[in-house]
Amino acid sequence: VGSTHRQQPRSCSTSILFAKKKKKATQPRRTAAIAGKGFGVGKSLTTPNPQQQQSLKPSALIVHTESQMHATLIQWLQEHPTTYISPKFTIKQSKLGGYGGFSSTSGFADGELIFRIPREYCVTQDDALSDISCGDIFQMAKIKRVPSYQMLLLSGFIAKEYLLSKRIKDKTAIKHWAYLQSIPWVQNQLGQDHVIFWSQEKVERLLGESLAYNDALLIRKTVDNAIRLMKDVIQPIVEDADDEEIEEAVKGAFVICLSRSFAEEVESDDGATVEIENALLPLLDVLQHSNDPNTSLESYDDYILLRARGDISADEELFHCYQEERDDVIPKHKFFTRYGFIPGVREQVVELLDNKSSIFF
């Protein structure tokens, strides 16, 4: 993941200090803001106007990528009658590393719909709280306001689902299996790295005197606490999973949720309170980050929409602002401890740390 810059500057919205998300309130109530990937903020609306209804037809089965895991994801998304994925949208390898979203041989006009994903195909807090096998435990964590319970709910749920998906032949029995198999669960998969994966020795050696040290310790402590809790939750469900496998799954799940989940301000049904909730939004998290994005996200009760933000040329990569690049919002060293990358920097993080880069020191 990295950043890019377009000729016409576009502002990237301010952030909510969590990850990303949208959640349903009683219609037609809608929240004031939806966060971008990790910590960016977009907008949330009640109902689409007539212009926003353009191209809202069910998506035909079109080959959008040569990547098998993403082809499986898209095929699953297209099973829903309200999914729309533009035939102009494609997934291929990005110059920034890993995969990215692109326009195909024809580009997008300003405001043109790129895709629409039904809300029920997103992974939400509600999925965790209503889960038959461990929903009661997640409910208790929420009621007691266990530290970082938002991340615990989402990561604990997908870790359990991921472990189950590895053991059953009928993958469709796992609601979000096609999405879970499309995202990286271990270090170096699709170029992924994160301090959660590092050994304590590596953390001390590379980060010990850096600006990122305390934040890295805080995140790792949170994950260690989650691992202890989730071992007790998961082992009765996935009986043949040993401690090491559960630990690896929870670590991978936390990295996924920190780097890919979206945060939203969600108004309660009675309008008395507003909370932040997190969700994983399939397909949107394929896009790479830019502080000057060429797409915009709209959130509704039943689906999310991605639109072109300005004219997009043929074969141009699509970008979304995951977090505004401002030191007073989140300094660059925290981009790494939270998201696992530093925007606009192509050098390896280890090299930056060895060379005592001003990003970290």
Image (cartoon, helix red, strand yellow):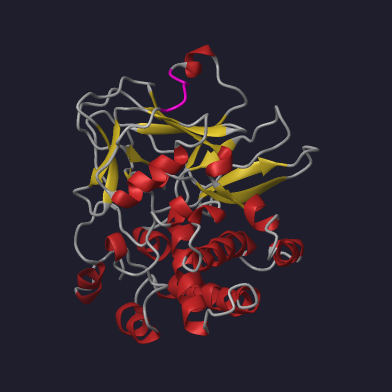
Residue 361, above or below 31: below
Q: Position of residue 234 (x, y in %)?
A: 61, 73
User: What is the total number of numbered labels drawn onto the structure image?
Assistant: 0
Residue at far front of view: 169
Q: Nearer the viewer, residue 51 or 81?
A: 81
Residue at far top of view: 50
Tell me the residue at 50%/17% (across/down).
53
Where does the C terminus fall, quadrant-wise? Answer: bottom left
243 on left or right of 310? right
Residue 251 appears anywhere in the view: yes
Q: Nearer the viewer, residue 232 or 205?
A: 232
Residue 229, above or below 173: below
Residue 57 belongs to magenta span: yes
Q: Position of residue 265 (x, y in %)?
A: 62, 43
Tell me which corner region of the image, top left, top right, bottom left or bottom right, holds residue 284: top left
Q: Nearer the viewer, residue 226 or 205?
A: 226
Residue 286 appears anywhere in the view: no
The stretch in magenta equals 55-59
Q: Position of residue 345 (x, y in %)?
A: 23, 56
Tell me the residue at 76%/62% (across/down).
143
Residue 68, above or below 6: below
Residue 199, above or below 262: below
141 on left or right of 327? right
Residue 43 belongs to magenta span: no
Q: Position of residue 314 (x, y in %)?
A: 20, 27
Residue at far bottom of view: 201
Tell me the residue at 65%/32% (across/down).
30
Q: Main secondary structure of the magenta part?
A: loop
